Amino acid sequence: MDRGAAARVSVKAVFLDADGVIQDAIIDRPNAFVRLRGTTDRLPEFSNDLFGAGYKALTGDSDVVALIASVLERWDCAGTLDDALELWNMIEVDDDAIEVVKSIRRLGFTVCLASNQDSYRGNYMSENLGFRELFDREYCSFKIGHAKPDEAYFTHILNDLGIRPAQAVFIDDRPENIEAAQSVGIQAAVYNLADSSTSLAGVLAGFGVAT
């Protein structure tokens, strides 16, 4: 569906990705990796291995905390599991994005978090960052059993809300996720917090979702 035709469809729900859209990693995170590892030696490989633990747990099939612990043991890290979990949740929420969420909810749109997250990080976001109250629904991959860009992830959300694909708008920072959403008929666009040339409110306005 082209953007002109999409604008004529009554949008009922907005799906927002988390990382890169409404939140980002805290600036000190690279230094935290060094402290956890205890050295800068082979740091990129270590970081990839640690992040890989999270990827393996995105659909809720694995215990992410156990996977992280195994990485620390394998690399003989100086830091503890608690240190790693603190690093895991180093998140900086974008205040402007949060205001956008609140604004479009007040206008009557159903606003949902649509994010690939393991259980530890996803629960932290819900409870400690207040996303449980911020959003109408939280669709984290570990709860659904499917992760983006799997089309089943999006069809699950549509079925749960009981809406047609064209009645939803999805915003994500990864083009492959946008393509997957569009393949099932959802209106979607790429947006990234790091791109100062645009804004979340501006992208949503292009779909008739004004703040």
Image (cartoon, rainbow, N blue to C red):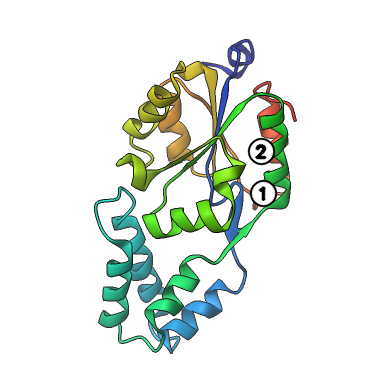
Left or right: where 188 falls relative to 205: left
Residue shown at the point (68%, 45%) measured from the top left: 97
Residue shown at the point (53%, 18%) measured from the top left: 167
Q: Position of residue 38 (x, y in %)?
A: 43, 89
Looking at the image, residue 129 lies above or below residue 59: below
Q: Position of residue 153 (x, y in %)?
A: 36, 34
Q: Position of residue 128 (x, y in %)?
A: 55, 58
Q: In this rendering, which labeled residue sits more in front, label 2 or label 1?
A: 2
How far is disc 2 from disc 1 in space, using C-alphas? 19 Å
Are the two marked residues, 2 and 1, in contact with CB atoms closer than 8 angstroms? no
Based on the displayed image, in which of its 4 quarters is residue 208 positioned? top right
Looking at the image, residue 48 lies above or below residue 105: below
Residue shown at the point (50%, 65%) measured from the top left: 89
Of callouts 2 and 1, the N-terminal one: 2
Number of residues whose C-alpha sits closer than 10 Å to that of mark 1, classed few (under 14), some (14–19) or many (20 or more)? few
Residue shown at the point (37%, 39%) measured from the top left: 149
132 and 120: which one is in front?
Answer: 132
Residue named by callout 1: 195
Based on the displayed image, in which of its 4 quarters is residue 7 positioned? top right
Number of residues whose C-alpha sits closer than 10 Å to that of mark 2, classed few (under 14), some (14–19) or many (20 or more)? many
Residue named by callout 2: 101
- Amino acid at pointer 1: Asp
Query: Which label is found at residue 173?
Result: none
Looking at the image, residue 42 lies above or below residue 123: below
Q: Position of residue 99 (x, y in %)?
A: 73, 43
How many numbered markers are drawn? 2
- Amino acid at pointer 2: Val
Q: Tell me the element at label 1.
A: loop
Quadrant occupied by the C terminus = top right
Q: Tell me the element at label 2.
A: helix
